[in-house]
Image (cartoon, rainbow, N blue to C red):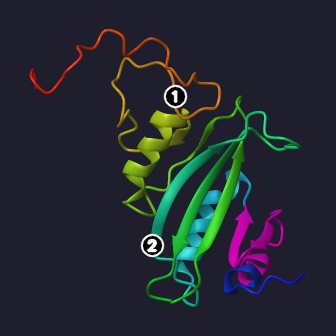
Amino acid sequence: MTIDHPAAGKLKERFGNIPLKIASFRGQTQIEVPGEHLTEVVRFLRDDAALRYDMLCDITCVDYLNYPGWDKARFGMVYILNSVAGEQPRLILRVFLGEAQLAIDSLVPLYAGAEWMEREVFDMFGVRFNGHPDLRRILTWDEFKSHPLRKDYPVTGLGERENYPVLNRDSA
């Protein structure tokens, strides 16, 4: 099956030595990029005159713990790029990270808007972003030791909510 996406051919041409896996599902093109090459691939997508992926829409993470038939690394980073100026179709980049190597380069030097999205992924999943200018928790408190969106985090929590006062309509 041939992937009909403007970025697919340009990436294969420019990064022929990097094992990129390109797939399409329901009109969305996804490219699996090795983590060590993420920055140079994203820089190329942003700076190429024909592509101009000038908008980083989202950064998130997926925990594949105990996913049936899964043989890749546990965590999957997801980067969604749009080309506003170049009018190219949306592009999804994926990078897989194992538990032992839960770090990747920050995209803040390329997209300033990545700062808060990377902080959220750090807080919720524990992924570290090398070179991030202010990597600290954004949704939980500094002393919080866990990462609530990991699949091994208990649904009821780890006892961190039991000491909070209960507020009702009369006391608020």
User: Quarter of the image holding residue 101?
Assistant: top right
Residue at 80%, 64% (x, y): give it. 18
Secondary structure type for disc 2? strand
Residue at 46%, 47% (x, y): give it. 118
**26 horizontally vs 145: left or right:** right
Mark 1 residue type: His
Image coordinates for residue 59, horizontal then vertical, percent: 51, 55
Residue at the extreme front: 170
Depth check: give the residue in front, 16 or 71: 71
Nearer the observer: mark 1 or 2; the answer is 1
Looking at marks 1 and 2 on the same chain, the residue that comes earlier in the sequence is marked by 2
Is residue 16 in the magenta section?
Answer: yes
> Is mark 1 in CB contact (under 8 Å) with mark 2?
no
Image coordinates for residue 169, horizontal then vertical, percent: 14, 27
Q: Which residue is mark 1?
A: 147
**163 horizontally vs 71: left or right:** left
Mark 2 residue type: Met
Q: Crowding near pointer 2: few (<14 within 10 Å), some, many (20+)?
A: some
Image quadrant holding the N terminus, namely bottom right
Q: Crowding near pointer 1: few (<14 within 10 Å), some, many (20+)?
A: some
Image coordinates for residue 26, horizontal then vertical, percent: 72, 75
Count of numbered circles on the image: 2
In the image, residue 127 sits, relative to residue 10, either above or below, namely above
Is residue 109 in the magenta section?
Answer: no
Image quadrant holding the C terminus, namely top left
* Residues in magenta, as a range: 10-32
In the image, residue 123 sits, relative to residue 84, either above or below, namely above
Residue at 65%, 63% (x, y): give it. 93
Q: Which residue is mark 2?
A: 55
In the image, residue 59 sits, relative to residue 57, either above or below, namely above
Residue at 45%, 72% (x, y): give it. 55
